[in-house]
Image (cartoon, rainbow, N blue to C red):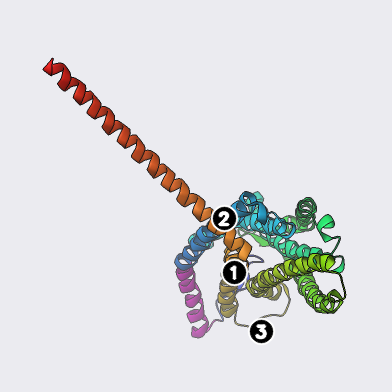
Amino acid sequence: MNTLSLDENITSWTLSDSTNRSEEDWARIQSYYNLINTFSTVCPAIFGSILLLGILGNGMVIYAILANKFLRTCPNMLFLNLAVADLLFLLFCVPLQAAYYISKYDLILGEGLCKLFKYTIFVTMSVSAYSLMIICVFRCIAVAMPLQASRILTKRYSLIASGLIWLAMLLLNSPIALYYSEASGSCTSKYDDKDTIVAIAVGVDFLLPITACFVGTGIITVSLRRNQKVFKKMDYETLEKLESCRRSTRKVVILVVSVAVVFFVCWAPFLSITLYNALPIGDRVDPLTVYVAGVIAQLLAFSNSCANPIIYNFVSTDFRRGFRRIKQCRLRRGLQRQSTNNTTRSDIVLRERNVSLKLVQSDVK
């Protein structure tokens, strides 16, 4: 069930003809089953941590953007889209993958759920990558047309772009759903169709948007430096507008580069293993080594879904402010609740005293 079947090579190796095996081969097979037992405990624990951190972090990002007007900007609407994709990935893919490790690769999902699981992994990954790419495209427009940027780059266009990204990725990744099957007893790709899946997963879903993202940020950085010389010749009012746009663009670019670098570091090893498993290069690398590398790469890829909120908190002052407001709001509510409870208790005590006084007065009479 690991994407493009991380254990596929080693499984076929362990099930192959056992008559010609040496003692070393048997020792390696035993090591494989020992690793399965270890991973069945360690991996679900790591996935559980990723799930909790990711839900909390991405939930805070979504709430912060929706609750704070100053965060509802054009680029932040696309960061919101990224958080929604991560949250969907966390809620659907992470628990299934953890269950797969717990079952020691014996989990049967059924044909429909198998296809949906694989499809969701690639759709959410590509939505994240293309959201970053579109942020870069919008910032390029802001640098090229700084005076018109506020009219062109609105929240409305960001929301339209987010919707189009989801639609395009749902359609583009549809072959992945078609080409995965559980007919062999495990949720793997049909062997003859691996080239198609690799072209989509590695090329279109990952390399294209991430390359465009890095190229875009490079163009923006060069343009901002060139524009500095032009700005000096302008009147004060125009200069103020351009400086504001420049500062805003610089902040967004730093945030996008940070998120894109972490995204690349997390997903590149996993997709490299995917590419290796799909290529007909034989047994150049020990299957056991490929298997262990695949599991580590998968954990790294899945951890990306909880990384972005941490990056926002460290890199963006606006997001830090938004997160602080959430904490302050919760603290205020807690104090109000405590104050209400204290008031209620005081009222009860006063009523009891009044009743006691009335009883004493009636006894005296």
Q: Amino acid at mark 2?
A: Met
Please report whichever mark, 1 or 2, sits nearer to the chain's N-terminal start: 2
Kindly indicate the quadrant of the structure image that contains residue 317: bottom right
Please report whichever mark, 2 or 3, sits nearer to the chain's N-terminal start: 2
Which is more foreground, mark 1 or mark 3?
A: 1
Which is more foreground, mark 1 or mark 2?
A: 2
Q: Residue 205: which disc?
A: none
State yes or no: residue 176 in magenta. no
Label 1 to label 2: alpha-carbon separation: 25 Å
- Among all residues in the image, which is located at the extreme left? 364
Which is more foreground, mark 2 or mark 3?
A: 2
CB within 8 Å, label 2 to label 3: no
Which residue bears the numbered disc 3? 284
Q: Nearer the viewer, residue 257 or 165?
A: 257
Segment colored magenta:
21-39
Q: Residue at x 57, y 54 (%)?
A: 59
State yes or no: residue 35 in magenta. yes
